[in-house]
Amino acid sequence: MDDQTALVEDAPVCASPLRRRLWLALGYAAVGLGIAGTVLPLLPTTPFLLLAAGAFAKSSPALRDRLYRDPRFGPLLRDWQSEGAIPRKAKAAALIGMSVSWAIVVLTASRPLVPILAGTCMAAVAIYIVTRPSPSTPAAEDAALDGAVAEDGGNVSALRNEA
């Protein structure tokens, strides 16, 4: 990628092979946790994918771009990167998941302090999620961006600067 198409968050790839491998391992671990978060109610998905994108930016920009092109996770990452936005469906899924998780904690906790602490943490996260804007880009435009990514040879950074 040249300087004109580089993202603000782009970091130079680590010159040290050991550091590069550590960033790469962190990226893969974060992707694994993000994928697990799609089915486990207490595990978030997006923060782990953002961590993975950052780690891949320092170890393998090609893997970072691949993550941004992913049909399931790419739109979430692009919306967050460009606007700090969370789609309404993702907000609803997160709030439902936290509610179900809190109900399970309430039903299974042996001490009353546990649901209070868990509920307080979940309420703080819920407030943060609800106060994030929804993306201004409709889903149809996301599909157009995905098509443009394929035509551009996969350079997500170039798309971000054009949008």
Image (cartoon, grey):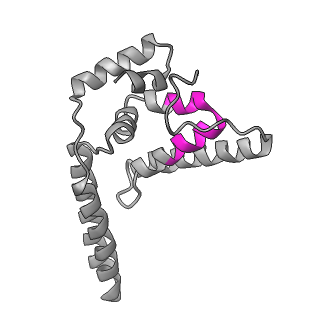
Q: Residue at x 58, y 27 (%)?
A: 62
Q: Identify the residue at the far right of this view.
A: 17
Foreground residue, 64 or 107?
Answer: 64
Q: Quadrant of the C terminus?
A: top left
Residue 4 left/right relative to 96: right
- Reply above or below: 154 against 43: above
Q: Identify the residue at the far top of this view.
A: 151
Q: Residue at x 45, y 50 (%)?
A: 36
Q: Quadrant of residue 55?
A: top right
Q: Main secondary structure of the magenta part?
A: helix
Residue 7 left/right relative to 117: right
Q: Is 86 inside the magenta-drawn segment?
A: no
Where residue 75 sits in the image (x, y, percent)? 35, 33
Where residue 134 sits in the image (x, y, percent)? 22, 43
Foreground residue, 82 or 69?
Answer: 82
Q: Quadrant of residue 17?
A: top right
- Reply above or below: 44 against 76: below
Where residue 8 sits in the image (x, y, percent)? 49, 36
Foreground residue, 41 or 81?
Answer: 81
Q: Residue at x 50, y 51 (%)?
A: 33
Where residue 159 sits in the image (x, y, percent)? 41, 22
The span shown in magenta is 51-66
Q: Residue at x 58, y 21 (%)?
A: 2
Foreground residue, 144 or 110?
Answer: 144
- Reply above or below: 45 against 152: below
Residue 156 left/right relative to 75: right
